[in-house]
Amino acid sequence: MKLTLPDLTLLILELNHLLDTGRYDAISLAEVKQHIRDGSILRFLRERAAEDVDLSIYLDSDLDGTFEKFYVTYLQNILNAYGGNENRKWRVQNRGLCLLIAWTNEIIQQGTGWQPNRNMAGVEYSE
């Protein structure tokens, strides 16, 4: 599987949907961190949210486990570097899903190569 920006943004949409339902507000920061540590965060979300989330593109169709391994490893690196500073750095202190959204966004921000669609932006920008 080739990792693309849409893979990460689609994951953010799935996480945002879970957050929007309000049914998963009880997923704590500690719980998310524990599942990041043990590498089971995507599987935990699929089990916990059942029909409310579709992570099959990341877990079922990714036969060699590339996305899951990349995502978990990146989250583990963020946790090791910044764990405990979530409120100061990302303004997150209450909901584990918010932490996952913030850290997935962080993965995108640390990447390279993204360019805005000039047709959609409607304004000039410098490269």
Image: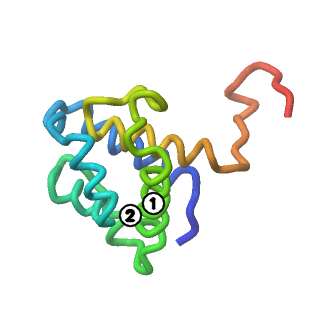
Q: Amino acid at mark 1?
A: Tyr
- Which residue, given by chain and number where applicable, does mark 2 sit on? 58
- Looking at the rendering, in which quadrant would you find the C terminus? top right
Q: Nearer the viewer, mark 2 or mark 1?
A: 1
CA neighbours of label 1 inside 10 A, class few (<14), some (14 to 19), many (20+): many
The residue shown at (38%, 64%) is: 58
Does the CB distance between marks 2 and 1 fall below 8 Å? yes
The residue shown at (54%, 48%) is: 107
- Is 83 rendered above or below residue 93? below
CA neighbours of label 2 inside 10 A, class few (<14), some (14 to 19), many (20+): many
Q: Earlier in the sequence, mark 2 or mark 1?
A: 2
Q: Secondary structure at mark 1?
A: helix
Please provide percent x and percent y for residue 110: 62, 47
Q: Is residue 126 visible?
A: yes
Quadrant of residue 63 within the rendered picture: bottom left
The label number, if any, that marks residue 71 in the structure image:
1
Q: CA distance from mark 2 to mark 1?
A: 10 Å
